[in-house]
Amino acid sequence: MHLLTSIAEHHNALMIIIGTPRRGFMSMLERMSGESVSAHLIHRSHRPLLMIPPDAQFSGWAPGYPADS
């Protein structure tokens, strides 16, 4: 968990973007072991956090899509 915040600090990132946790076995393990990655970042990172849900679909501009003019 500290790795993400360290990388963000090293590169002076504007924000951290992660996927939201899925439900299931891994989610259960996170709850049993303590804090999830997203909860850790929310409480301990000094950078904005953008959480993308698993069913999110992209429908906007991206470099090279469509071809840059």
Image (cartoon, rainbow, N blue to C red):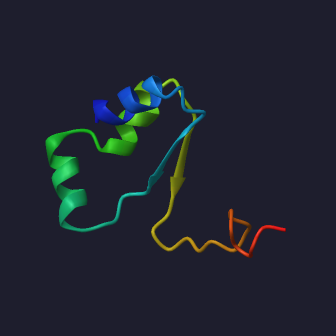
Query: In the shown orientation, is residue 2 left or right of residue 50?
Result: left
Q: Nearer the viewer, residue 31 or 58?
A: 58
The image shows residue 12, relative to residue 35, as above or below, that is above
Q: How many marks?
A: 0
Residue 6 placed where, x, y %? 36, 27
Point 35% across, 34% down: residue: 40
Q: Which residue is at the far front?
A: 69
Q: Nearer the viewer, residue 17 or 30?
A: 17
Query: In the shown orientation, is residue 23 left or right of residue 42?
Result: left
Point 57% across, 37% down: residue: 15
Query: In the shown orientation, is residue 57 left or right of residue 5?
Result: right
The image shows residue 1, relative to residue 53, as above or below, that is above
Point 15% across, 47% down: residue: 32
Q: Quarter of the image holding residue 60?
A: bottom right
Point 24% across, 68% down: residue: 24
Query: In the shown orientation, is residue 28 left or right of residue 48?
Result: left
State which quarter of the image contains the N terminus: top left
The image shows residue 38, relative to residue 54, as above or below, that is above
State which quarter of the image contains the C terminus: bottom right
Residue 46 placed where, x, y %? 51, 23
Residue 13 placed where, x, y %? 54, 32
Q: Nearer the viewer, residue 1 or 27?
A: 1
Residue 67 placed where, x, y %? 74, 74
